[in-house]
Image (tube, rainbow, N blue to C red):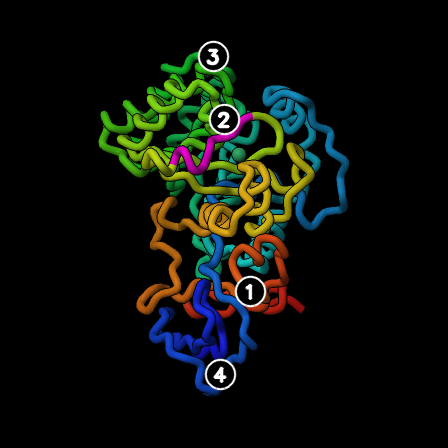
Amino acid sequence: MLLANARLPHTPAPVDVAIAHGRIAAITPAAGRPGIDLGGALLLPSFVDGHVHLDKTLWGLPWRPNSGAPTVRERIENERTHRRTLPPVQQRGAALLRQMIAHGTTALRTHADVDDAYGLANLEATLELRQAFRGRADIQVVAFPQSGILTRPGVAELLAEALRLGAEFVGGLDPASIDGDAKGHLDIVFGLAQRFDRGIDIHLHDRDAGGNAQLRDIAARTIAIGMQHRVTVSHAFSLGTPDESDFARTADALAEAGVHILTSSPSVGIVPPVHALRARGVVIHAGSDNIRDLWNSLGTGDMLERALIIALKQGFRSDPDIETALSLCTDAAALGLPAHRLVVGAAADLVALEAETPAEAVALRPVRRLVMKAGVILAREGRCVDEK
Ligand SMILES: [Zn+2]
């Protein structure tokens, strides 16, 4: 297959991209060869959403006004009350996956709720989605104790069963502020990861200095069991602290332990500072988190939109800074997957769109003319190819 008359970032002259066996086989100056004429469209590596909740989404359903509340604890209870009225996870999750793929995402990590009320139902449904979308999206599944572990009898055992069923990651949630016992919570999470040889992805919302103390504890535990670059902390808002020495101490601990930081870049409150973390060697990447669900009505699953949100929150204005925001949204390596790169030999995971530069792509978020994974065209002109 040949993608003819395309452009690569920072390369003004158009190129032809030959694809063979799912990989980029050659990139040569455009020469009017027969193929799929992209008309000078810009190619970007396909997008990576490091944190979604496929089991929570209301995508594809009529608009539902948000019934949430101000605190994490209240939002958990609100969801537990209303979620039983929703159609099956497979239906809602598939609708969102198609939306994400049509917008250029071909790799993602999703958290699936495991709790005392639902047991493993959401996790099993999410594993079904992973299987149904094999070849269209690389989907990693986190067994996520949304309602806590220690405060909900039986959840630790359910998490173990989730890992036996095939979840690649064990999740955690606010070890101190939700479960009330940071040590006890982390003992279980790290114990399960070690026992089943799986990665870890912990939601940590605590914004005070206690949040950074937990991050340093997580870093120390990661080194202790040799899990460098297999542990992610999502949100980690406390890294936005104005206390420079506390920040530096914590960032250095995360860098040494290879603990990755995932941001969804919420509009309210402090967030991890992208440049300062990268300067200290910390991997930071991005995800959507809640997309049109009982927690949050906003979001579309478009990672160009997420890059815009990151750029706005971080005060990024220059083109290199905006490209940095976009780089958080294409970082497959941060998930432990092969990097998405536009070079000969890399998997042909790419997106084509009408923009002069990557920064303009973030600014305009134009329709995705083509989305390809491993050389297979998944979407054209903003729609999945198997859609009517
Ligand atoms: Zn989340």
Which tag, 2 or 4, sits closer to the chain's start? 4
From this view, report whether residue 69 is shown above or below residue 129: above
Which tag, 1 or 4, sits closer to the chain's start? 4
| Magenta-tinted stretch | 270-277
Question: Do the numbered discs 1 and 2 sit on residues whose CB atoms are within 8 Å?
Answer: no
Q: Is mark 4 within 8 Å of ligand 1?
A: no
User: Residues under labels 1 and 4: Cα distance?
Assistant: 22 Å
User: Which residue corresponds to mark 2?
Assistant: 237
User: Which residue corresponds to mark 4?
Assistant: 35
For badge 1, the amino acid type reads Glu
Q: Secondary structure at mark 2?
A: helix
Q: Residue at x 43, y 29 (%)?
A: 202
Q: Nearer the viewer, mark 1 or mark 4?
A: 1
Q: Nearer the viewer, mark 3 or mark 1?
A: 1
Is-magenta flag for residue 298?
A: no
Q: How many numbered badges does the structure rendering display?
A: 4
Which tag, 3 or 1, sits closer to the chain's start? 3
- Does any portion of residue 388 appear in the rendered image? yes
User: Which residue corresponds to mark 3?
Assistant: 180
User: Residues under labels 4 and 3: Cα distance?
Assistant: 60 Å
For badge 2, the amino acid type reads Phe
